[in-house]
Amino acid sequence: MGGRIRTIALTVGCMLLVACSTVQHPSGDPWEGANRKIFWFNDEVDVHVLEPVAKGWRWALPEMVRTGFTNFFQNLGTPVVAVNQLLQGKPLQGASDTGRFLVNTIVGLGFIDPASQWGLKRHDEDFGQTLAVWGVPGGPYLVIPLLGPSNARDLTGLVVDTAMSITPFFVDGWILTTARVVQTVNARSGVIDRVREVKAASLDYYSAVRNGYQQRRAAAIRDDLDVTPATEENELYYPGEELKPQ
């Protein structure tokens, strides 16, 4: 356990040093050449593996079941969301999402979302957003193998959020891996048509995803992101994310 904590701390420290460095690139993408290669690899995996599996998943499972899986994985992540709200000085939202977690776990068994019907609105916070609230700059844009778009600050946030999750401490690794695969396939099944449409409409798909990611994260930090059951499945595809009306 101690070794794991030291490794996480060292990783976070290195990432924060990169995030705090000044990026003199107009698009925030100074490593575009390497990022494009990783992006190409990710897209090949998506086209030849993930998308076909997601199509089969969508064909085999009715929408109600797929929505249940979406609710389940959202509910698992709610405690981390609540912790980040407290770290950002949002105790009321933290209390609201804690209530959501209890209601959806006890009443909805994780697969149903009665909390939304009871007025407990869902929020979306992570440690990357917490660092932004604390004044940490985003740092260079990154494309992570198999994970997709990020930046130095958000990658740091992902590491910390993973460490804050309690499930790895009492759930076997193979179960967590299987759950992550199911979560990814289920989310991808919800954006099959959207991804195809934007690929066809984009002169440069890489730039479209990068710009969409940067806009989405900026909106999330401002709390202008519309996080609803209808848009949550679009997390795999940031250009399609919707913003709150101004």
Image (cartoon, rainbow, N blue to C red):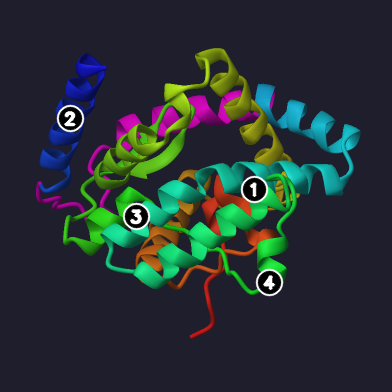
Name the residue carrying label 2. 9
Horizontal relation, residue 98 to residue 6: left or right? right
Q: Count the labels in the image.
A: 4
Q: Are marks 3 and 4 in contact (CB under 8 Å)?
A: no
How packed mark 1 is, by other alpha carbons closer than 10 Å (few <14, some 14-19, many 20 or more), is some
Q: Nearer the viewer, residue 142 or 129?
A: 129
- Measured from the top left, where is residue 89 in percent x and y? 27, 67
How packed mark 4 is, by other alpha carbons closer than 10 Å (few <14, some 14-19, many 20 or more), is few
Name the residue carrying label 3. 84
Q: Is residue 80 above or below residue 170?
A: below
Cα separation between marks 2 and 3: 18 Å
Cα separation between marks 3 and 4: 23 Å
User: Looking at the rendering, which quadrant does residue 189 occupy?
Assistant: top right
- Measured from the top left, where is residue 229 in percent x and y? 68, 60
Name the residue carrying label 4. 118
How packed mark 3 is, by other alpha carbons closer than 10 Å (few <14, some 14-19, many 20 or more), is many
Mark 1 or 4, nearer chain start: 1
User: Looking at the rendering, which quadrant does residue 37 occupy?
Assistant: top left
Name the residue carrying label 1. 105
- Which of label 1 and label 3 is nearer to you? 1
Q: What's the magenta region? A: 21-48
Mark 4 or 2, nearer chain start: 2
Q: Is residue 47 above or below residue 69?
A: above
